[in-house]
Image: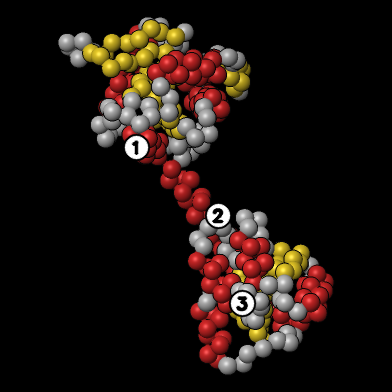
Amino acid sequence: MRILVADDDAVSRRLMEKILTQSGYEVMTVADGRGALDALSHKDGPRMALLDWMMPGIDGPEVCRQLRARQEGSYVYLTLLTSRQDRTDVIQGLEAGADDYLTKPCNSEELKARLRTGLRILMLEDKLVEAREEMRMRATHDALTGLLNRGAVLNFMKVEMARCRREHTPLSILLCDVDHFKQVNDVHGHLVGDQVLRELAHRLKQAIRPFDGVGRYGGEEFVLVLSGCGSEQLRHRSGDILDAVRSKPIETSAGPLHITVSIGAFTMDSLEWSGDVEFPLGRADGALYRAKMNGRNCVQFADHLSTNDGEHVGLPTVS
């Protein structure tokens, strides 16, 4: 565990560093409050700190106060070192954000015991953060594929729709359906089908940019949300996504399987947002239906026109 010692007295710093190093800590030292605040604010900064109350520039309680005002990063366990005995001063330090205090000169055994208490608190905090992240993942991600689940990917789409409208940029939505997936399950079993879906999810995720979105819409259907992607760019990117899936067989426990997908794609510009996801999803779904009817393993694009009976006019197929 890394620990910071902040004290303007060089002798005190060296003595504290020796005690802590012998106890197995990785010690970092600074001579003033500004240095302490900078070190503790760093993303990979120490998780524990011993702060002298009186330091040049920024004193110990003010370091505590400013550090607690920052919400980002992991929790840091702060101990104030002070020669003050007055209970009012102790209360002031704790209210500033300190977790503990020690009276100088410190007893080395008491110091080690107090720090062990701090370590237990940090371990508990880390477990709580881990549990919270696991709960968040379960609530927003599909258990089989690891992609965003239906609710999360639709929420991502809503956020991107609002952002693209503000920034006057296009947004493309793709609905992908695995071709002949029922046959995979019927012939090879559902476990093999699950293997196919997991690998497809991996390939789809690798085929998009880090800030794009991809989620499992349901069954063997996936939704891709491509931010800032206009219709001309979509033609190239959708072809790349097709190739990412069909470029090589998927290795399964039943042997390699050649899998393809059909894609319905729709692009809207910033003037067309209606505020809900049903409109672009409906257009993409209509295009996906035509892709299935046109032999699968292709992309169909929905444009902004429609025939008199409400069927969308598709753009040329990419195969």
Residue 15 to residue 304: above or below: below
Q: Which residue is mark 2?
A: 130
Which of discs 2 and 3 lies nearer the camera? The answer is 3
Q: Secondary structure at mark 3?
A: loop
Give how far apart the Cα atoms at labels 1 and 3 are.
Answer: 44 Å
Percent x, y of residue 67: 56, 67
Residue 317 seen from this side:
yes
The answer to whether the residues at label 1 and label 3 have Cβ atoms under 8 Å apart is no
Which of discs 2 and 1 lies nearer the camera? The answer is 1
Give how far apart the Cα atoms at labels 2 and 3 are.
Answer: 33 Å
- Whichever of labels 2 and 1 marks the residue nearer the N terminus, that label is 2
Query: For residue 184, which numbered disc appears in the image?
Result: none
- Whichever of labels 2 and 3 marks the residue nearer the N terminus, that label is 3
Give how far apart the Cα atoms at labels 2 and 1 are.
Answer: 35 Å
Q: What's the amino acid at mark 1?
A: Arg
Q: Secondary structure at mark 2?
A: helix
Q: Which residue is mark 3?
A: 59
Q: Which quadrant of the figure has residue 99?
A: bottom right
Q: Which residue is mark 1?
A: 166
Of all residues shown, which one is farthest toward the front?
57
Q: What's the amino acid at mark 2?
A: Glu
Residue 154 seen from this side:
no
Of all residues shown, which one is farthest toward the bottom?
86
Q: What's the amino acid at mark 3?
A: Asp
Q: Residue at x 53, y 57 (%)?
A: 72
Residue 295 to residue 276: above or below: above
Query: In the image, is 293 to the left or to the right of 208?
Result: left
- Specify the color scheme: secondary structure
Percent x, y of residue 62: 56, 74
Q: Which quadrant of the figure has residue 170?
A: top left
Query: In the image, is 119 to the left or to the right of 278?
Result: right
